[in-house]
Amino acid sequence: MGGGLVSEFSGQRITVAGLGVSGRSAARALAGLGARVTVVDGGDGERQRAAAAELERAGITVRLGDGATLPENTGLVVTSPGWRPDSALFAAAAAAGVEVVGDVEIAWRLRGPGAPPWLAVTGTNGKTTTVQMLAAILRAAGLRTAAVGNIGTPIIDVVRSPEPYDVLAVELSSYQLHWAPSVRPHSAAVLNLAPDHLDWHGTMAAYAADKGRIYEGNTVACVYNAADPATEDLVRAADVTEGCRAIGFTLGTPGPSQLGVVDGILVDRAFVPQRHRQAQELAEITDVTPAAPHNIANALAAGALARAFGVEPKAVREGLRAFTPDAHRIAHVADVAGVAYVNDSKATNTHAAQASLAAYPSIVWIAGGLAKGATFDELVTAAAGRLRGAVLIGADRQLIADALARHAPDVPVVSLDRTDTGAMAAAVREATALARTGDTVLMAPACASMDMFTNYNERGEAFATAVAALTD
C-alpha cells in the first residue's frame, strides 16, 4: 500500500522524534520510501543504543543525547506520540517553518487506492477494550481486520502491509490525534472525557479539542456517550461529511438514533429501518465479559461502530462472546473465603477507578501511586457508600487519605509507608483483614504505577501473586 505516494517522501530530509516502537516503525517506512531519515532521541542509554544500532544497519542516521536540535535541512518532523507540543525540537521546527506530524498522520498519507476504511475510537478510558471488542465483532462478520493505532502493531506497518484488509479498528490517543490533522475515519467514537494528560495538553479544553479531531470528516456515524454531554458537544463542533449521523449509546433505554439496554439486552435503535418505533436485539449483558457497567458501555460503542459499517446483529453477539479482555482490566483473580479479589491495575486515573468502583456493592479498596496532579474528592464522594475499607500505597497515598477523611470519615483506612517488593503483599493482607464475606477486594489504584513498579502490568501481577499466596 502507499506505492503511489512514494514521490511525496522520496529524497526528502525527515527527522523522526523518538526511538520508541512508533518512531522506529516510521523511520523504517520512510527510509523504505526513499526519504533521508534522521532519528533523534534525548536518551543515550543501553535501550536507545540497541535501537539505534538496528536502524543504522538499515542506513538510517540516529542522533542520541540531543532531542532538542533540529537537524539541518529538515523538511518534515515526524513525532512519537509522547513528545510534548512545547518540546524544543518542535519550537525549532516552527521557527523554520517545518511541519510536525505524528506516525498516524504518516500512515493516513501512505494509504493507497482501495485502502481499508478506519473505524476509530478515543476517550479517556476504555479505548483498548472497545477497539478489541470492535475487531472481534468485525472478524465474526467475516471481515479481515486488525486492531491498530495506540495498540498492538504500529499502524504504519499495517497500512504498508501487502495483506489486504477490509476495515481497520483504530485506537487513537489524544497525543496521536493532536499530530494527525488529515485523518478522516469512516466512523468514530469518543467514549468519555475526564481530566487526564493535562500536563501534556495544558488545559482541559485543549485535551477535549484534540479528542474531538477524531470526528472530523466522518462519513457515516459520530458515536458519542449520552451520559457524557461533552462527547456530544464534540460531535456538534465537528466538520463531517454531509449525511453523517450522530449516534448515542446509553446504559438506559435508548431513544431513536441510539444504542442502549432494555431488560438486560443490548439493543439498536439507530441502524434499523423504523428507528422511531423499532429496536433490534444485538446481544445480552451476559455476552459481555466482564459485565461491569463501563464495559457494557464499551460494548455498545463497539456495536455502534460495527453497525455503522453494515455488520449484521448476529456478528455483534458472536464477537462480544468471543472477546477476552486483556489482563489487569477489572479481572477476577480469585475467591478466597467468600471474598472476591479483582485486579484493575489499568485504572490509572480517577475516571477509570470510579467506573471500576461502581461495579461492586461492597469494596475494600486498594489504591495509590503517582497521582499525576489528580484530585480525589469527586471519586471518594461517588464511592463512599460502597467502601468497607481502604488500603493505600504509593507516593501520593496521602492525597487519597485526605479525601477519604473529608468525604468518607467512617471508612477504615490503612496507609502503608513502604515501597519495597513486599508492599503489595502487605496491602492484600491488610485488605483481607478488613473484608467480610460477600465483599470485593478491588485494586483500582486511580494512580500511575511508576513510583513502585515498572508499569501497571507489573503492579497487577504483584497483586495476583499476593492473592495466590493467601491460599498457600
Image: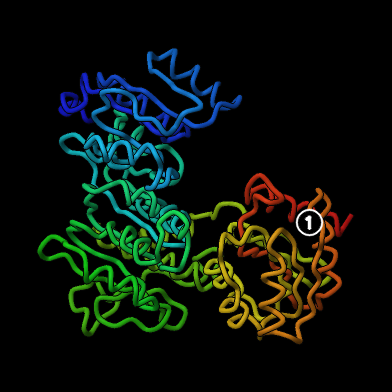
Task: Look at the image and tell me whether residue 147 can be seen.
Answer: no
Split into 4 quadrants, where in the image is the C terminus? bottom right
Task: Look at the image and tell me whether residue 388 can be seen.
Answer: yes
Direction from residue 243 to residue 68 in the image, left or right: right
Mark 1 highlights which residue?
424
Closer-to-camera residue (61/309): 61
Furthest-front residue in this view: 95
Q: Residue at x 25, y 22 (%)?
A: 33
Closer-to-camera residue (119/391): 391
Image location (x, y in percent) of residue 146: 38, 43
Q: In which quadrant of the rendered view does residue 266 lie?
A: bottom left
Callout 1 crowding tier (Cα within 10 Å): few <14, some 14–19, many ≥20: many
Q: Is residue 185 above or below residue 15?
A: below
Secondary element at tag 1: helix
Q: Residue at x 80, y 62 (%)?
A: 427
Q: Amino acid at mark 1?
A: Met
